């Protein structure tokens, strides 16, 4: 029983030594994703998304206000309308309400897809820059969103500088 423990301990020491030797050959860097959220690329993507949201919101709110005004007018004047006019107006208002609801859902879906597209493009640019900086500095592996104990391996600031320079150039 004691021999098995000694063998296991010996094997663990050998594996640890081999692992340490292998790690000594690999240069590792890390980036902090929380700081990359401040990159020019992500800020630009967020600004584009916000502008598109505001534009759509303005259009849909105007349509909604017009519909609400027309509903109010119908409720006020409906008693004086002929049955035929009331039926026609009700049908028109119901159709417009359904169309507005559909347009709102469609706009939400389109904006969500657009948001994912823009953020995906920004993330792709960020990954490219992380790769470039890591390669230029001679790293074999760059870990994203890691607990960084040794600040010497943190290349986040270099990546941010490059990203912001690229963002300013566009």
Image (tube, rainbow, N blue to C red):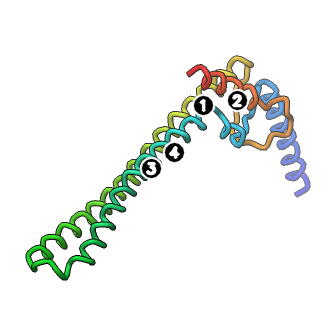
- Where residue 85 appears, as percent x and y from the top left, is 11, 73
**Badges 2 and 4: C-beta atoms under 8 Å apart?**
no
Residue drawn at (86%, 46%), measured in percent from left and top? 7
Q: Which residue is labeled 4 in the image?
A: 50
Q: Which element is circle 4 on?
A: helix
Between marks 2 and 1, how big is the CA–CA gap?
11 Å
Residue 160 image label: 2
Tell me the mark number nearer the camera, choosing from 2 and 1. 2
Q: Which element is circle 3 on?
A: helix
Q: Which residue is labeled 1 in the image?
A: 127
Q: Residues within 10 Å of mark 2 (few under 14, many from 20)?
A: many
User: Left or right: where does residue 150 sit relative to residue 136?
Assistant: right
**Badges 3 and 2: C-beta atoms under 8 Å apart?**
no
Q: Which residue is labeled 3 in the image?
A: 112
Tell me the mark number nearer the camera, choosing from 4 and 1. 4
Relative to 67, residue 53 above or below:
above
Q: Nearer the viewer, residue 5 or 77?
A: 77
Q: Nearer the viewer, residue 87 or 25?
A: 87
Sooner in the amino-acid sequence: mark 3 or mark 4? 4
Between marks 3 and 2, how big is the CA–CA gap?
26 Å
Residue drawn at (79%, 32%), measured in percent from left and top? 154
Task: Say which quarter of the image contains residue 69.
Answer: bottom left
């Amino acid at each position: 029983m004691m021999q098995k423990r000694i063998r296991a301990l010996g094997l663990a020491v050998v594996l640890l030594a081999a692992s340490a030797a292998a790690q000594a050959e690999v240069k590792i860097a890390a980036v902090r994703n929380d700081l990359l959220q401040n990159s020019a690329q992500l800020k630009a993507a967020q600004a584009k998304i916000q502008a598109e949201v505001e534009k759509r919101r303005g259009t849909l709110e105007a349509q909604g206000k017009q519909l609400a005004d027309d509903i109010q007018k119908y409720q006020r004047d409906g008693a004086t309308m002929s049955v035929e006019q009331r039926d026609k107006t009700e049908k028109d208002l119901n159709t417009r309400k359904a169309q507005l609801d559909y347009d709102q859902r469609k706009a939400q879906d389109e904006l969500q897809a657009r948001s994912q597209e823009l953020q995906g493009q920004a993330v792709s640019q960020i990954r490219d820059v992380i790769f470039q900086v890591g390669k230029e500095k001679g790293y074999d592996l760059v870990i994203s969103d890691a607990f960084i104990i040794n600040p010497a391996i943190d290349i986040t600031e270099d990546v941010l500088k490059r990203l912001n320079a690229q963002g300013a150039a566009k």
